[in-house]
Amino acid sequence: MMSRILKNSFGEEEKILQYFSICNRYIKIQIVALLLKWLAIFLAISAGLFFLDQAQLIAIPESKKIVGRVQETPYEEILGQNNFSDNLSRYLNIISVEDVSQWIVSIWLILAIIFFLIITPAIIFYNVFYLKISNEFVFTDQRIIVKKGWLETSVKTIYYNQITDIGVSQSLLERIIKSGTLSISTAGSDGYEAVLYHVRSPYKLKKVLYDIKINYQKKNDNNYQEENNEQK
């Protein structure tokens, strides 16, 4: 759906020839890839917490036994150097296996809430809504209009007679899903004047843009010749 900012950019007699945004296939793959990445992180942390829980089931009881045996040795009582074991014993008596297990479960629940209620909706919102509405491209009968951003926006105009080169680049994944990047160069500019990322069928889009440019030039040439004829 075209944004209001873009609609307000058209002239009264300007005709829309093609409106598009980032390829839907790219967005779907991006969502899946990001979700899998964060899911892998969540599962890795969950596995670490599980092993930590299993380790403390053995470590805490064994530590209590060891400290208990150390405190009973007459050697420490003679030397009066049992402060460390006393402090450790008091600490071990405060904590229990059940308490540590509850702490680990609480940490896991917090991570699960963050993943399912914050990260997952954020990924879906960013890719489904933000990327689409923040990257809008229009070919009209007079110019190219490129809108970037959502809350803070910028609108760029490129007239067809300014275009000097149209480039296409594709990664391996983009070739598979038939998307790519369309780069537009203009006279007097360094690099590319506009880069349309992850658009669908970029080579077909390049041909469409080239045909529009040729027709625009022919129309201008005919109008120029008619004006010269009228002057004569």
Image (tube, helix red, strand yellow):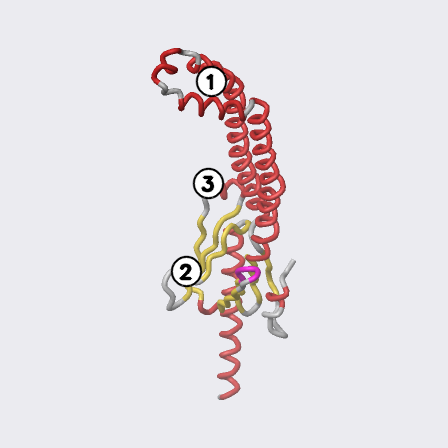
Q: Residue furthest left?
A: 79
Q: Is residue 110 above or below residue 69?
A: below
Mark 2, secondary structure of its residue: loop
Q: Residue furthest bottom?
A: 232
User: Which residue is located at x 49 percent, y 24 percent?
Assistant: 90
User: Which residue is located at x 36 percent, y 63 percent?
Assistant: 190
Q: Is residue 54 above or below residue 46?
A: above
Q: Is residue 32 left or right of residue 70?
A: right
Which portion, as a residue range, is magenta? Answer: 147-151
Inspect the image, locate mark 2, and give the three-letter code of the amino acid beneath it.
Tyr
Q: Are marks 2 and 3 in contact (CB under 8 Å)?
A: no
Towards the viewer: 135 or 76: 76
Mark 3–mark 1 distance (CA, rounded to whole Å): 55 Å
Residue 166 image point, x, y percent: 44, 58
User: Which of the two marks, 2 or 1, is nearer to us in this view?
Assistant: 1
Inspect the image, locate mark 1, and give the three-letter code of the amino acid beneath it.
Ser
Inspect the image, locate mark 3, and give the three-letter code of the amino acid beneath it.
Leu
Residue 41 image point, x, y percent: 51, 34
User: Which residue is located at x 40 percent, y 11 percent?
Assistant: 73
